[in-house]
Image: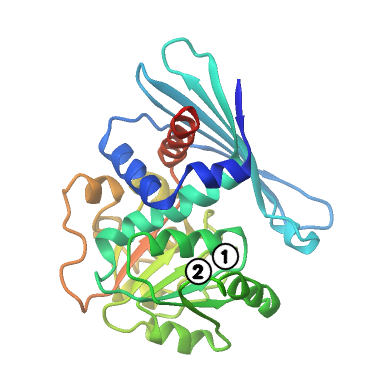
Amino acid sequence: MLMIDGENVRRLTEFRPLVEAIREMFCKDCAMPVRHHHTVKVPGAPDATILLMPAWTEGEFVGVKLVNVFPGNSAHGKAAVSGVYVLFDGLTGFPLVLIDGGELTARRTAAASALAADYLARKDASQLLVVATGRLALNIIGAYRAIRPIERVVVWGRDRARAEQIVARLAHEDIEAAVATDLAAAVEEADIVSCATLAETPLIHGEWLRPGVHLDLIGGFTPKMREADDECIRRARVFCDVMDSATREAGDLTQPIASGVLKREEIEADLYGLCRGEHPGRTDDYEITLFKSAGAALEDLAGALLAWRQSRA
């Protein structure tokens, strides 16, 4: 069985082809059961989460991702997300490839947000604010640069030193980069705001959002987690990746739905609707759009297939 490590995942899944692979998978008939979601106690650290995410295309391929999310890893200088992905032949069930799940998750997550932004962000969006300092930060920047003319990147994080490290990594690329010291001011200037944190209290306030901004919420994957407040929901046209899972698992949607700030039917579309042309996405340059990503197993399958096929080529 072939094995693809993290370095080769990055090499084999360039962002523009990855965005297109995920777009194609949302247009296909891909089975995707509700993921298994288990909480694990970790002595002396925040609770961890185990995720089991299967997806398959009938008669073609079956894939399963096993992921561990250990928030306390940041204290030890380790990534919060790790795991493995196994791709199987859909006719025989035999394994084809074992892939680094942490790197695959980071890249497909960033690519899925970029895919949504391809429908929801202004075509001329050039200033990106990244509210993240973990593994996803550089992936978000790379993915957005693949679909929009990003000229300036601003990074904000609770740990300024980590934000400075990310900006330093961009020093040799043809892009302006800076660390934000004032989150409110940075949001007010941005064309796209992308958040990938483990926050349980909202970081982004709706009063900061200027007309035409696109807000991308990646981090909150449980009902207790939240990155944006109710005013963001009130002011924005709301979209998500997969309607059923996002409205059941993501606190940025479940909490405002529970409080009555948002009705489920007011969520305009998910990535199925956008990719299949059932919803036009952004309709003018002044509306505020919000995309909530909860993660979808078909995105992993798309990324794994791209990596496997590129490795064979």
Which secondary structure, mark 1?
A: loop
Q: Residue at x 58, y 88 (%)?
A: 181
Q: Amino acid at mark 2?
A: Glu
Q: Residue at x 40, y 63 (%)?
A: 144
How far is the residue under mark 2 from the one under mark 1? 7 Å
Question: How packed is label 1: few (under 14 Cα within 10 Å), some, or many (20 or more)?
Answer: many
In this rendering, would 15 be left or right of 234?
right
Camera-side mark, 2 or 1? 1
**Which label number is shown at residue 197?**
1
Q: Amino acid at mark 1?
A: Thr
**Hey, which quadrant is residue 260 in on the image?**
bottom left
Percent coordinates x, y for residue 285 in the rendering:
20, 76
Q: Residue at x 24, y 69 (%)?
A: 123
Percent coordinates x, y for residue 196 in the rendering:
53, 63
Whether residues under marks 2 and 1 lie with C-beta atoms below 8 angstroms apart, the answer is: yes
Percent coordinates x, y for residue 175 in the rendering:
46, 75
Residue 26 sits above or below residue 228 on the image: above
Q: Residue furthest right?
A: 44
Q: Which residue is mark 2?
A: 227
